[in-house]
Amino acid sequence: MSKLTHIDGDGAAHMVDVSAKNDTIREAHAEGVIRMNAEVLEAIKANAMKKGDVLATARIAGIMAAKKTSDLIPLCHPLALSKVAVDFEFLDDGIRAKAMARLTGKTGVEMEALTAVSTALLTVYDMSKAMQKDMIISDIRLLSKSGGKSGDWTAE
């Protein structure tokens, strides 16, 4: 079994020391989906929701969340992100959110991209729940990451 990086010799959780790592350009892409009925989807497309522009608000929420990932995920390093982008794609039965996070640093940005997507989708839910309470958020996943010692990775 490989040595666990966030557990010390006594079994206690700790934050990994990345100070000896080289700075590299690191980037991660993530996605997720929220499924909803046609009425809600059309209201979002038409920007007709009572709470305002759903996708603009969700985009800002996702970017803000990426910047606060270390406040939400234990043992995550606070990062000086150089770029976070959140985009949306309409599906027949919902919306796909995609996020990208980038920096030059000593540790990856996978959690930031995943947090951006999750929060963007939760914001879509929050702004739309008056019309439909049983929307389904699913398929949140890492699509790719680049940079660092472990190199590039892409989902199949």
Image: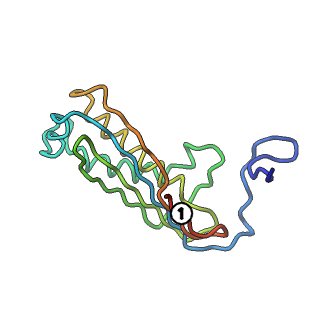
Q: Tell me if 99 is positioned left or right of 112 in this view.
A: left
Q: Position of residue 77 (x, y in %)?
A: 62, 54
* 127 or 28: nearer the viewer: 28
Q: Tell me if 65 is positioned left or right of 71 in this view.
A: left
Q: Position of residue 85 (x, y in %)?
A: 37, 60
Q: Is residue 35 above or below residue 154?
A: above
Q: Amino acid at mark 1?
A: Ala
Q: What residue is at 55 percent from the left and 71 percent from the top?
A: 104
Element marked by disc 1: loop
> Total number of numbered labels?
1
Task: Please identify the residue farthest to the right as the structure is shown.
Answer: 10
Q: Is residue 47 above or below residue 154?
A: above
In the picture of the structure, the residue carrying the numbered disc 1 is 80
Q: Position of residue 102 (x, y in %)?
A: 48, 66
Q: Quadrant of residue 37?
A: top left
Q: What residue is at 29 percent from the left and 25 percent from the top?
A: 133
* 54 or 64: nearer the viewer: 54
Q: Position of residue 92 (x, y in %)?
A: 22, 44
